[in-house]
Image: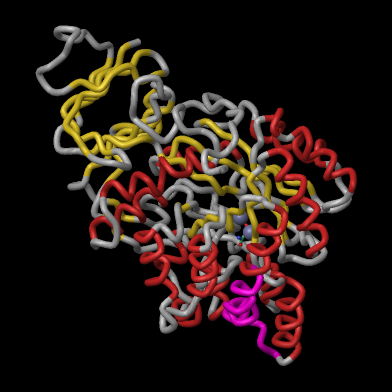
Amino acid sequence: MITLIKGGTVVSSTGRTTADVLVDGEKIVALISPGASPFGSIDADVTIDATGKYVIPGGVDAHTHMQLPFGGTNASDTFETGTRAAAWGGTTTIIDFAVQRYGERVQDGLAHWHELAAGNCAIDYAFHQIIGGVDDDALKAMDTLVDEGITSYKLFMAYPGVFYSDDAQVLRAMQKATDHGLLTMMHAENGPAIDVLAAQLAESGKTSPYYHGIARAWQMEEEATHRAIMLADVTGAPLYVVHVSAKQAVEQLAAARDRGKNVYGETCPQYLYLSLEDQLGARSEEWGDFEGAKWVCSTPLRSREEGHQDAMWQALRTNDLQMVSTDHCPFCMKEQKELGKDDFRAIPNGIGSIEHRVDLLYQGVVTGQITLERWVELIATTPARMFGLYGRKGVIAPGADADIVVYDPNGHTSIGVGKTHHMNMDHSAWEGYEIDGHVDVVLSRGSVVVAEGEFKGTTGHGSYLKRDLSQYLV
Ligand code: URP
Ligand code: ZN
Ligand code: ZN
């Protein structure tokens, strides 16, 4: 089957050009300058008119949590609902986190994640491995991760009693990672100290969602980020810090990079747009000040007065942060977030954004925060390179998978329940956001999965991707 995407502006991380994109089956086979086809006139089975639109590589969201067990419940998107929502929003690859919880075998956790995902995804998917209990058995299991196509794993310096690793465990895991070229992804918050602060707040009657962010002070993120960098340095492990929200944590990353360390960081749309003040001010008839639970996530939303959001945008421009993932971890208000109605500590942590990352970042182009090329780099190209998918994903070039988005800069997207909302959630963390742009057409390996305002994909189309080592290893 031959597909021709005609007349658009093809945008890459390094520039833009007017070209037709020729797709044969699942692969991109050529970029053709208008009127310069070496093939004569092309008799395509499907022609997509992209005149006046951007043609970009499908988004790669490198941080999602479908069905994550957390706080006595599970993230509300399944691989089926979550990947369909991703496709709606122009994301064609996700990297989800297979979970090993304390006391479980890594292999069992990974096998379970394959069972959850296989046959259920609308787009391609890969896994990182959460190591939630570093012991001899887990360290041994890390020896085989690369063979499984898993070249990165996540540790938590937060959530004592759940996924937490102490410094000795972090050190041992990093040593193992160094042996195999695994990229260490770190949740960098000082969990034990946060738990003391959270208990003190709750005991003094400060139980509303806002206090989640007060307990998880930026000092807790800065300190843990620094410690992670030092532990990585002493072990020689490359480090990738997830969901960075504090400007002081960025300063730690930037300082380490300036010293030549192999250290990277991502931020997420919530840390670019939302703030602790918004959360404090959120009230609804239904939920009162518990409305703020919609934005309980870790790391938490930060104070706008302190300038964290501006610092995240700046770091994306200066490459002190290299990419934007969602940390998609949705929970409904009913029966899930409301578990913490009387105590913020029991609110399941997470926000759902998988459908909106490409649009929300494009809004940064509209407002002049980032260039068009940097947009593509942040949402697709760097995630693919960072996590060993580049060449297949993250680029429009001959030989790459035909994961392509036709994006209309003159279109418009109204985000919210009843508008654009396909995630399995009873609310949107992004209700009321208006985007000057629109995901028009989405192709996943050559198949049209979204077009004409309709989902045209199929559950089970998505394949498991074995990943190569990160291109950022030195
Ligand atoms: O609040 C968050 N981030 N929930 C998902 C788990 C994690 O720490 O990434
Ligand atoms: Zn985390
Ligand atoms: Zn996460």
Q: Is residue 283 visible?
A: no
Occupied quadrant, residue 233: bottom right
For residue 14, above or below residue 328: above
Occupied quadrant, residue 220: bottom right
Position of residue 121 measured from the top left corner of the image (x, y, whole percent): 56, 32
Position of residue 282 measured from the top left corner of the image (x, y, whole percent): 47, 77
Q: Nearer the viewer, residue 293 or 242?
A: 242
Q: Nearer the viewer, residue 350 or 464?
A: 464
For residue 210, above or below residue 129: below
Residue at 80% x, 53% y is 172
Q: Nearer the viewer, residue 8 or 190?
A: 190
Quarter containing the N terminus: top left
Residue at 31% x, 12% y is 2
Residue at 78% x, 40% y is 142
Task: Specify start and end residues of the magenta stretch as a single range.
Answer: 205-224
Q: Is residue 91 visible?
A: yes
Q: Nearer the viewer, residue 174 or 466?
A: 174
- 419 displayed left or right of 458: left
